[in-house]
Image: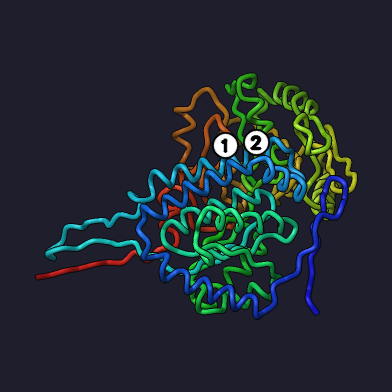
Amino acid sequence: MKKEINTYNPYNGDKLETYTLNSNEDLINKLKLADNTQKDWKALEISKRIKLLQNLANEIDKNKDELSELITKEMGKPLLESKAEIEKCNLLIDFYTINADQFLQDDIIETEAHESFISYDPLGCILAVMPWNYPFWQVFRFAIPTLTAGNVGLLKHASNVTGCAIAIEKLFLNAGFPEGCFQTLVTDHNGIETIIENDIVKAVSLTGSEKAGRKIAELAGKNLKPSLLELGGNNACIILKDADLRKHMDTIVKARMQNSGQSCIAAKRFIVVEELYDEFIKQFKSKVEDLNYGNPLYETTTMSCLAREDLAKILEEQVNKSIDLGAKVLIGNQRDSAYYQPTILTNVTAEMPVFKEETFGPVAAIIKVKDEDEAYKSASQSKFGLGTMVFTSNYDAASKRISEIEDGAFFINEMVKSDPRLPFGGTKISGYGRELSKEGMLAFVNKKTIYINK
């Protein structure tokens, strides 16, 4: 009997589509196709791969409205944010269209040899396990550099955005990428284990939770295959006494509330020095209250539901446990199905879930500290390591603190965000490896040493 999955609109609960899971035979056939395709794909001139990137950008641009609506219907983010996500995918393509050839050039190394250099050869077939919160961007930041380097890709997407996964494969095919270069797998966790164990798959990239990361790392390690993990985060947003709140408050609120708070790199802990605390609370609360909740398909909507009701329930439980430990609700803490009201908690301490865990939704935990030293100490008090942001007028002083933060990113007077030009990734239980920039293009290549003597 064939297994099926359904997708639902989280805003109204309407059923969207039913999809049949790939059988084991389907999965094996997809693996074989990927393997056969990669033999020719890796031999294709880089200029021809880049031309296909340009075709892909055109396909995305042509279908932007339809794709944006699909994102919103499947995972609930406001339509304007869905459009921004699609547009960011094309910025990524533009970056690698310009830089891929240079990134993949041999590196000449002067030695005693007649000639010695490093070449960058694709590993082969790479599996990507991707999340629902940015269903196009997360996939594209894996696929574009990975495929352009000469690899082929297999995508196991989150089941609630299966329509997005299928649409992405269609984009690659319509752009002229060879069949088998990028394939979507509609499968479950058992299917993933079978795929990773198959010799055709050479490496795995996962963006997801700590739990998922540990499982994928275990499977990859058992099979001696490299993995790249981009996992959860509990980013600190430090507000120092000289921060220009009027200038930066829109950015500070966006850092927590964008995508209804469902972002690994969102600001989750707001660490505020006591001299500015009252003014920060006043301005932050006012901006949060101005968010416009409604149907995510309306362009006036700035805050919508979470992607699934179970996610809202988990967030509600984290907040209530924190309240039991002494946190105070300034605003919010109301749930209706998958909607969770934007919430501000004060009197937050380090033993509370909203301080030490990842809260995946619109909850801001506010921590009052005495001074700058205590702020940086509190920010570092985390098992996560994706990023930290600092708001201050003295950016020179903040720059001297960079080495105190162990995270993968340190942003001054800006929210932590991904940029195609800069490497992206974390430390500690936020994962390992880097996506984007040149680092992302070389994530799944064999850095081969070549040594030639006459």
330 left or right of 222 in image: right
Q: Compare residues 345 and 176 and report the one nearer the observer.
A: 176
Q: Position of residue 19 (x, y in %)?
A: 76, 65
Residue wearing tag 1: 389
Q: Position of residue 204 (x, y in %)?
A: 54, 66
Which residue: 69% across, 60% down?
158
Q: Nearer the viewer, mark 1 or mark 2?
A: 2
Callout 1 secondary element? strand
Q: Which mark is residue 255?
A: 2
87 left or right of 81 in image: left
Kind of residue sitting beneath label 1: Met
**Gap between marks 1 and 2 measured at Cα:** 10 Å
Kind of residue sitting beneath label 2: Ala
User: How many other residues sit within 10 Å of disc 1, few (<14), some (14-19) or many (≥20)?
Assistant: many
Q: Point out the residue furthest to the left here.
A: 454
Q: Compare residues 416 and 366 and report the one nearer the observer.
A: 416
Q: Which mark is residue 51?
A: none
Task: Specify the quadrant that holds the N terminus.
Answer: bottom right
Looking at the image, is 212 positioned above or below residue 73? below
Task: Specify the quadrant that holds the C terminus.
Answer: bottom left
190 left or right of 108 in image: right
Which residue: 58% across, 45% down?
60
Visible residue check, residue 352: no
Q: Compare residues 141 and 32 and report the one nearer the observer.
A: 32
Q: Position of residue 40 (x, y in %)?
A: 41, 68
